[in-house]
């Protein structure tokens, strides 16, 4: 169990004014403009003051996206544990620190779940998205200056799907783009929160071994014909469609 201590913006002066030894420091993002403090420096200041961990909350509504990498070599530092939370959650914790709040930390894996910034559902032309998905949160990716960084978003998810398509085309050079897409969709792994959707996590190995069968099309409402079930590719693999 750890006590939580409000440590302002996490400056050296803030930590000099409180006792965080063996405790968790609650720190606000910012300040904005002159005197701004890197997330990295907030954590290092807490570590130097003897804190066991750091909780950084946003200074405005919305999810906080943090990096401790400011300069070369930062990725090899031995940081104490730190997490980022929303402004509302941080202000709630700040209020509770006056009541002797203590917390317990555990581990949890979000592997296989949909990122909170991803959208899903029907489109205006009666399709359902996503049809396939790939890892796109804290992906170790190339960065400027020949470096690497952990990045989020479609920019790091789509290259994985593109690579899967390349492997499928290498194994089945006569397959059309639509056939390749259906091979991916019919062999996906299904996150629980998307079980009612059509197709999800790409399974390249399964997609490359699918065999062609007869065509089978269904039309959507409004006369816009599109594939609702399997087309050219057998449906023996795991599928998320009902």
Image (cartoon, helix red, strand yellow):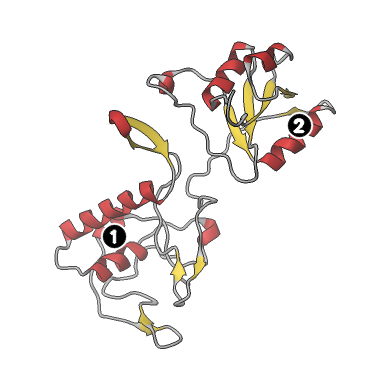
- Relative vertical location of residue 27 with respect to residue 183 in this rendering, above or below: above
Q: Is residue 227 left or right of residue 119?
A: left
Residue name at image x 63 percent, y 25 percent: 54
- Residue 94: give its label: 2
Q: Is residue 107 left or right of residue 73?
A: right
Quadrant of the image occupied by residue 84: top right
Quadrant of the image occupied by residue 45: top right
Disc 1 from disc 2: Cα separation = 50 Å
Quadrant of the image occupied by residue 31: top right
Q: Could you tell me if residue 80 is visible in this image?
A: no
- Residue 89: give its label: none
- Relative vertical location of residue 80 with respect to residue 232 in this rendering, above or below: above
In terms of secondary structure, where does tag 2 sit?
helix
Residue name at image x 62 percent, y 31 percent: 29
Q: The N terminus appears in which quarter of the rendering?
A: top right
126, 194: nearer the viewer:
126
Q: Is residue 210 left or right of residue 114?
A: left
- Relative vertical location of residue 123 with respect to residue 150 in this rendering, above or below: below
Residue name at image x 48 percent, y 44 percent: 111
Closer to us: mark 1 or mark 2? 2
Residue with the mark numbered 1: 207
As drawn, the residue found furthest toward the front would be: 34
- Relative vertical location of residue 49 with respect to residue 188 in this rendering, above or below: above
């Amino acid at each position: 169990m750890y006590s939580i201590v409000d440590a302002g913006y996490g400056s050296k002066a803030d930590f000099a004014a409180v006792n965080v030894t063996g405790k968790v420091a609650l720190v606000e993002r910012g300040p904005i403009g002159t005197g701004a403090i890197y997330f990295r420096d907030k954590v290092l200041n807490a570590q130097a003051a003897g804190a066991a961990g750091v909780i950084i909350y946003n200074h405005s509504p919305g999810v906080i996206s943090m990096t401790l990498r400011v300069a070369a070599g930062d990725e090899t530092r031995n940081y104490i544990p730190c997490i980022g939370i929303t402004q509302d959650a941080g202000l709630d914790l700040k209020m509770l620190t006056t009541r002797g709040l203590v917390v317990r930390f555990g581990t949890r894996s979000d592997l296989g779940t949909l990122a909170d910034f991803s959208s899903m559902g029907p489109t205006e032309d009666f399709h359902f998205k996503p049809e396939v998905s790939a890892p796109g949160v804290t992906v170790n990716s190339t960065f400027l200056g020949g470096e690497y960084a952990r990045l989020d978003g479609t920019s790091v998810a789509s290259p994985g799907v593109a690579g899967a398509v390349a492997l499928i085309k290498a194994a089945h050079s006569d397959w059309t783009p639509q056939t390749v897409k259906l091979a991916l969709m019919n062999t996906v792994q299904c996150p629980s929160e998307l079980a009612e959707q059509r197709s999800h996590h790409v399974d390249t190995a399964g997609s490359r071994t699918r065999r062609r069968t007869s065509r089978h099309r269904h039309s959507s409402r409004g006369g816009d014909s599109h594939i609702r079930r399997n087309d050219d590719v057998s449906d023996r693999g795991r599928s998320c469609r009902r």
